[in-house]
Image (spheres, helix red, strand yellow):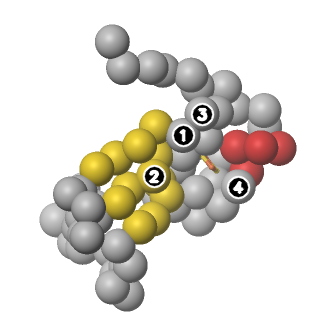
Amino acid sequence: MPDPAIYLCLNGPLKVEGPVRLVDHQGKEFNLQGKDTYWVCRCGASGNKPFCDGSHKKNNFKAEQAAR
Ligand code: FES
């Protein structure tokens, strides 16, 4: 299994490759059902926050940050 990492998808979500726990503002952990990979919305349009539901494509979300 690869080391945990977060990938910035071009014009899309954050791909989280784990295992990485996802915890809300109250300290409660999301049930990821043993998933080692999931996508977190960063466009704000998802109807299933904090997860990406593909809405960024309809909204033409742009994000092209590159590592320096
Ligand atoms: S990044 Fe995919 S719905 Fe927001």
* 4 vs 2, front mark: 2
**Residue in the picture at 60% in, 33% down:** 10
The amino acid marked with disc number 4 is Gly
Q: How far is disc 2 from disc 3 in space, using C-alphas?
A: 10 Å
**Residue in the picture at 54% in, 45% down:** 13
Determine whether the residue tagged by mark 1 lies in a helix, strand or loop. loop
Q: How far is disc 4 from disc 2 in space, using C-alphas?
A: 13 Å
- The residue that mark 1 highlights is 9
Label 3 with label 1: CB-CB less than 8 Å: yes
Label 2 with label 3: CB-CB less than 8 Å: no
Indicate which disc, 4 or 3, sits on the residue closer to the N terminus: 3
Q: Nearer the viewer, residue 45 or 26?
A: 45
- The residue that mark 2 highlights is 15
The amino acid marked with disc number 2 is Lys
- Residue 51 visible to an observer of this rendering: yes
* Farthest-out residue, left: 27
- The residue at label 1 has a CB less than 8 Å from ligand 1: yes
